[in-house]
Amino acid sequence: MKYPLISSRLAARLTILPFVVIALTIFVGCVLWSVQLSFTSSKLLPNSDFVGLDQYIRLFNTTRWIVSLKNMVVFGVLFTSGSLVLGFLLAVFIDQKVRAESFFRTVFLYPHALSFVVTGLAWQWFLNPALGLQEMVRVAGWESFTFDWLVNRDFAIYTVVFAAIWQASGLVMALMLAGLRGVDPEIWKATKIDGVPTWRVYLHVIVPILGPVIFTSVILLSLSVVKGYDIVVAMTGGGPGIATEVPAKFVLDHLLQRANIGLAMAGATVMLLTVIAALAPWLYLKHVKKGANG
Amino acid sequence: MTMTQSSSTSSLNKPKKIISKERIAIYLFLIICSLFFLLPLYIVLVTSLKTMPEIRMGNIMSWPETWNTDAWVKAWSTACTGLQCEGVSVGFWNSIKILIPSLFVSIMSGAICGYVLSYWRFKGAELFFGIILFGAFIPYQALIYPMIKIFATFGLYGTLPGIILVHTIFGLPIMTLIFRNYYSTLPSEIFKAARVDGAGFFGVFFHVLLPMSTPILIVAVILQVTGIWNDFLLGLIFGGRENMPMTVQLNNIVNSARGAKEYNVNMAATFLTALVPLLVYFFSGRWFVRGIAAGAVKG
């Protein structure tokens, strides 16, 4: 009885070993290596010539990076709040015992199954001024109608936000709907007896109850903000000019096309710090919760 | 049963027979939103069925005069990416070549890690799990350059085994998490009984746990099929010229500056690329939502 136990335990350790090696190499080693490279003067090839914070100083003096950061903030705020509000409304309206509930759920969620490339290309086609929405309205008779946001420096980023909200709000809806279904029916009975209007119940009672779901949604959405790359490449290619550049694209372009490893890794490190900052409240809450539970 | 579970505004009153203004507003909102969500799909589809002269007339929403499938044939077999004119079919088969082994390897890896973490605790297991979870949040940009270097050292960069390994690595966090969570909900007596009967490490896994894992395997397959098929960045960087996935090829076809733009071909190619995850979505139904819920746990 004793012998097979030991050999099984050995088998377990030998099996998990490659995964431990992978986790340490990739998720720890590669991150540290990237950060280390951001402190060197590496250009086409990596070197170990330590230059302190030079790359970071250059990074924040690069217009394209500043535009990228600004876009990430604009995109992050509008996309996160837009997806949350639309997703919440969709969930609330679906939760009114409507007929064809599964039809509506299916329609609202299907964009989530698509690639960001597909989403970007579909919206690019619809919003292109030459043959898309603008031309359709003009052909229909309103000849001075103008909607050229996709190719307009000042507004192009909002079209990307719009497409991204289209893709992500179904996810928020699915999460919120599950949350709404978990609300204690007694709460509804109680507010009904007190004659509280439905919208006030949602705003003042249900939203606080859904707190954790909202929190999860915000984390998921903000992670996709930092990672946002595919949709920009497909929809605008970062243009017109550099109007829709984002940090994820900045880093990859400098890494793969411009052969500026040090600068790219400085950008990647800033991205990593942004993610950690976004996760910090979640980690904090989890820690506090754990502590409270003993 | 469902009455008590779902929250309702009329749970005390008896439902009224007459359709109220409120109900009309609810349906109106949902229908308008449905149209908004269906719009891009509709436009992609009708554009792909039109001829170029019809597209140039400028009514993007109009129904095609006749259903013309030439653009589909062209998108599949002869559309050009730069100098090569082989259509998205090459990308389709590349994506299949990447998907099938990646699916198998990444799910088995996640299942084994989840199994070990649930039943075979080892020193540093908590730390290992923590690192894996952290891995889910690291932006790819902070990993890619060192990974390219490591993969190049082992001759894996730009190869099929290379891209399979990349998908396995980036699938590891979520796969490990869902399998660990699933196995930890199973009664531990099952494991103990199998051990008493003399089953070893692999015996318990393959003969006892894996046959019980069907629900979580379905969720894992849905998550990974859509995730790997829709990947753009990893395929672009690690796949190499020979293994360019369909998403990369689609983007090259549509956004290549060469020649006159054929929007019907572009949209047919877009629709073809969207088809696999869409089919998975429509046929998996509620399982897809389960997958989302499982994925959301990591948040």
Image: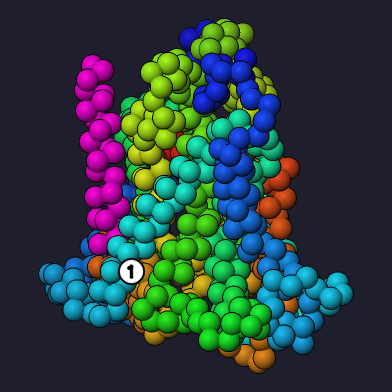
Residue A275, position in %: x, y? 30, 52
The region drawn magenta spans: A270-294
Q: Residue at x 39, y 25 (%)?
A: A196
Residue B9, position in %: x, y? 52, 26
Q: Residue at x 40, y 71 (%)?
A: A157
Residue A138 part of the magenta-drawn span: no
Q: How is the image coloured?
A: rainbow
Residue B22 picture quarter: top right
Where's the N terminus of chain B, which quadrant?
Answer: top right
Up the image or down, A115 lies above or below A212; here it is: below
State the residue position of label 1: A71
Chain letter for the residue marked with disc 1 in the picture: A
Instruction: Residue B136: tell me if it is visible.
Output: no
Where's the C terminus of chain B, which quadrant?
Answer: top left
Instruction: Residue A261: tell me if it is visible.
Output: yes
Q: Residue at x 22, y 74 (%)?
A: A59
Residue A281 part of the magenta-drawn span: yes
Q: Residue furthest left?
A: A52
Up the image or down, B115 lies above or below B254; here it is: above
Taking depth in this image into account, of B272 and B104 the one nearest to the observer is B272
Taking depth in this image into account, of A22 and A88 the one nearest to the observer is A88
Q: Residue at x 59, y 58 (%)?
A: B36
Q: Residue furthest bottom?
A: B259
| Drawn side of residue B162 relative to residue A46, left or right | right
| Drawn side of residue B181 relative to residue B277, left or right | left
